[in-house]
Each structure stands twice: as structure tokens, then as C-alpha cells.
Amino acid sequence: MSSKLRFSGKTLRAGVIGLGRQSVNDHVPALLRRKDVELVCVSDVNVNAHENFYKTFPELKDKVKAFEDFQDVIKEDVDFVVVAIPHDQYFEVSKTLCQNKIPFMKEKPFARTLDETIAMASIDGIEKYCFICTQRRFHPLYEKAQEALDELGKLASFNATYTLNLPQSVSGWRKFSDVCGGGVIIDMGYHIIDQLIWWFGYPDDIHAKISNLSTEDDFYDTEDSATIVFSYYETGLQGSIILSRCTGVKVEGYQVAGSKRFMEGGKAQLLVKDRVSGDPIYSDEKNYSEEMMDNQLDFFIDTFTHGRNFEKNHLDNLLNMKFIERCYRNKLSKDQTLFINAYKHRDSMVKQASDSLLGESHGIR
């Protein structure tokens, strides 16, 4: 199910911008597992993050430089960079890396809002250098599940749940939408939305209900719970996405119901059953987290080292942000619709739409 890793043939110098949990737990270990990558430097504005990095990877203390300013990473003659930072910093960092013609793999979301996404997608050369992480597309169990959809018969429903039990539902920069773009929909929900669009395409009908009522004595304006319902007119497929940081129990998984078979899965399990008898047809239980991160990094490196671009990745994430825009604001503006339609047909790009949006203050909900 997982691809055999391809190696570039030379040692690539890598940097990491942002030393939060995602970088330390996932991206840095994936970089260290590759025999053709040398991690030469990292950066984070918080010097405490430097200390945590060296505590986690003591063997890198005298091998990897740590900076506070991401610009110093660029000066280290890196071949590529992994970026995982607060969302309000992505535009500046992405633009700077593109100007310096450095390929980079950035964490989701594409941007904080659809308008900022359009501004990001309009940065000169970004399709050559920027890859947005959507890890589930590289997860062996999700790849297998996607391949098995045709075996389920006529599809009736897709339902996904991702809930957490957090004593404090949100903290730090994720408390405010002008910094992060939103709450559980743009954060926890992003990968489920990407999975939905990857498997079934963009829905015709989308409705969302959101709330931020879990903590009475702490101010924040991002949603900590959301229920999203959607449907497809042509096929009749419908379903829901339930997201919450405050349910009292951690649950992450999905179910797909077809006329012949039923499928349920998640990060560590996949089960396909006969619809009538309930007998299992296929089952796999394994944590493929390392393979997922390795496959994603491999795709990124193989793409830029062979001179291909990331336009398809950008279109996929543009549709993710279109979905999120519908959840938060119910409808799209005329300029947003023009840009997305034009992006699907790059030869007929509507410059007027991007120009008008680029002239606005992007990123504020």
C-alpha cells in the first residue's frame, strides 16, 4: 500500500521553520529517517523551543544550528525547508521562500481565509516551490480505503467524527481567529474535509453549525465545536462531519455506507464488511504514522527534484478552503468564485479577480 521511498541521488540540505509539536514529533523524525537528507538548521522565535528541540534530539546539538529569525535559515544554503508555524506568519514566510526560490513543505491550512489563500496562490512562483501538507493522502490505510470505494456499491453516506477531551479547549495563538483563521473546522476538520473532497469531489450543499461555549472564564473567538452536513445532488451521497475539542472522549474515525458493503476506518484501522451478513471482507489494524510522513516527504522531494510543480496540490487545498469559507461565511463572493474557476483552467486565469483581492486586506475574518 505504501510506496517504496525514492532517493534523490545527492545529499539535500534541509531546514525547519517552526519547532512546535508537529515539527518535533513528525517532520524532524521523517527528515532524519532519510539517508539523502541532512538537517542543517532550525528556527523558532521562542528560544525555549530550541532547548526542547535539543532535549528531544540530543545527538543534533553540535550538528544542527538553531536561529530565532527564519531569514537565517535561508542564509544556510538549504535545498528545501519544512514550515510549521502560526497561521498568520505563513504569508510572509512563503513569499520570502518563493523569492529565494527555495522549495518548502508547509503545514495546513493553505491560509487563514479564502481571500488570503487566493493571495497566497498568486505569489509569483509559488506553484513551483510550495507543497501544502495533507498527510492522509499518503497514509496506507486511507489509500487502500480510497481504492476500495468502488467495491461498496452505490454510495449512500459518509460520516466522520473527530472529537477530543481537552481540559482547556484552546490556548495560545489558536484562541483568536485573526491569528489562526478559525477553530476546529480549519484545524481538526481540515484533514477530514480534504479526505472528503479527495474521495468524492466538492459537495453541492454545505451547512455548518458552530459554537464556542466550553469555557466560561476564558475569552476566545474560535469555535470549539462544529457540526457540518453536506450532500451531492447528482449521486445522492450525503453525510456529516462532527468536530469538537470538548466532548469528554477522544474519537477519530469515519464510516462509508454503500449498497453492497460498509467501510469504517481511521489512522490505525480499516474494516470493510458485507452489508447484508456483516461478515468482514478486509481488515487491517496498524499504526502507519511513520509511513504516512515518509510517503509525504518522499512525494515532496521527488516532485521538486524532478522539476515538477505543485499546482494540483494547490487546487486541492483551494477547494478545501472554499469548503471552509462556506462553513464560516455561508457563501462565496463573485471574485472568489472567478478565481477558483479560473485556477481550474490556468490558461484562462482571470487576472481581474486576483488583482481585486490582492488589493484588499487579506486574512481577517
Image (cartoon, rainbow, N blue to C red):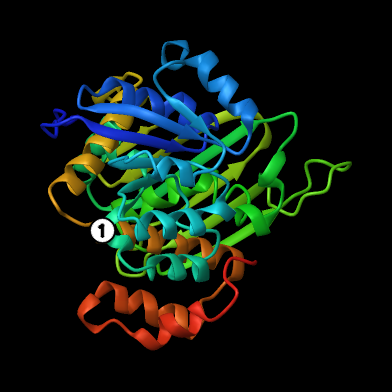
Task: State whether residue 180 is above or below residue 292.
Answer: below
Three-letter code, disc 1? Lys
Q: Is residue 105 above or below residue 297?
A: below
Question: Where in the figure is residue 22, as x and y percent of width and height?
Answer: 49, 32
- Residue at 49 percent across and 44 percent down: it is 70
Q: Which residue is the site of mark 1?
A: 128
* Position in image of residue 272 (x %, y %): 28, 31
Q: Is residue 291 left or right of residue 164?
A: left
| Residue nearest the observer in this picture, 327 or 313 | 313
Q: Which quarter of the rendered picture does the C terminus lie within?
A: bottom right
Q: Nearer the viewer, residue 213 or 90?
A: 90
User: In the structure shown, which secondary structural element does the residue marked by tag 1 occupy?
Assistant: helix
Along the line of sight, the residue nearer the viewer: 333 or 355: 355
Does residue 328 appear in this view?
yes
Q: Residue at x 65, y 38 (%)?
A: 245
Q: Position of residue 241 (x, y in %)?
A: 51, 49
**From the viewer's perspective, is residue 90 above or below residue 255?**
below
Of residues 114 and 131, the one drawn nearer to the viewer in this rendering: 131
Q: How many marks?
A: 1
Report x, y in % for residue 298.
22, 35
Whether residue 277 is visible, yes or no, is no
* Image point (46%, 61%), residue name: 321
Q: Residue furthest front?
A: 75
Does residue 288 appear left or right of residue 113 in this picture?
A: left
